[in-house]
Image (cartoon, grey):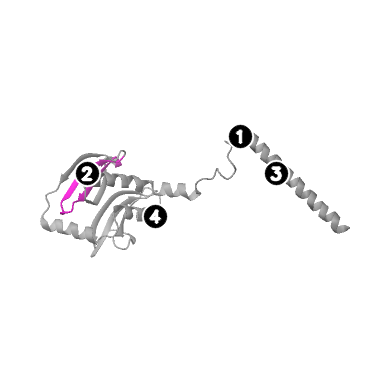
Amino acid sequence: MRKTIIGGALAGAALLAAAACGADARQMSAQGADTPTPYSAATTSPYAEADSKKHSGVKKLEEVGQAALKAVPGSTLVSMETEENGSLWEVRVVDAKGTEHQMDVESGTAKVVSGPSAEDDGSKDKAKDLDRIKAAKLDYRQAADKIATAVPGGRITELNLDSHRDKIVWEVEVVASDGNKQNMTVDAIDGKVTKDSEGD
């Protein structure tokens, strides 16, 4: 007898719950199909926005670099430096023959506004540039990404592929979020980031 009462009570509770769900479903249907469910509002990860902010400077730098590379097809970017309070980038690329081309690219629009003009470098300089390019495993974008991770909120103002203590590195000047300038290097082979000591 006791089992029958408990079983009946459970069955009754189940029927009441089903009826309540049906009412909720009818109410939601009456509100219209446009009403989002509680889960559809969270379409992006909370980390996506933070990551976007952290690398927004890298994205702009990449756009400037791509404009310069497009101006000299088949070239490799070896240097970028901000000028005119950050509104302009002086960019240098090296073509397949080792000739360096310099141009100015507008920061806001990523348009080449001056150049490209070929530099009249000697054969030794051309060979050095080509050797560095051949040895480097990281391009300017990857180097900038490493800096964005190492100095969150930092703004790169200079980026150069060079030799440093018998290593091929990207020499980087970055302005940290507190306004202080830092000189750093990114190993162009293994990606290791090092903060330069004073007078280095």
Q: Nearer the viewer, mark 1 or mark 4?
A: 1
Residue 22: give x, y in percent of width and height. Answer: 70, 42
Residues under labels 1 and 4: Cα distance? 45 Å
* First of labels 4, 2 by sequence position: 2
Q: Which residues are magenta?
A: 86-107
Residue 81: give x, y in percent of width and height. Answer: 26, 47
Return the residue at label 2: 71
Q: Amino acid at mark 2?
A: Ala
Return the residue at label 1: 32
| Quarter of the view holding residue 41 | top right
> Which SS type dominates the magenta stretch?
strand
Return the residue at label 3: 21
Farthest bottom residue?
Answer: 166
* First of labels 3, 4 by sequence position: 3
**Residue 87 covered by magenta stretch:** yes
Mark 2 and mark 1 residues within 8 Å of each other at the beta carbon: no
Image mark for residue 149: 4
**Residue 99 covered by magenta stretch:** yes
Mark 1 and mark 3 residues within 8 Å of each other at the beta carbon: no
Residues under labels 4 and 2: Cα distance? 29 Å
* First of labels 2, 1 by sequence position: 1
**CA neighbours of label 4 inside 10 A, class few (<14), some (14 to 19), many (20+):** some
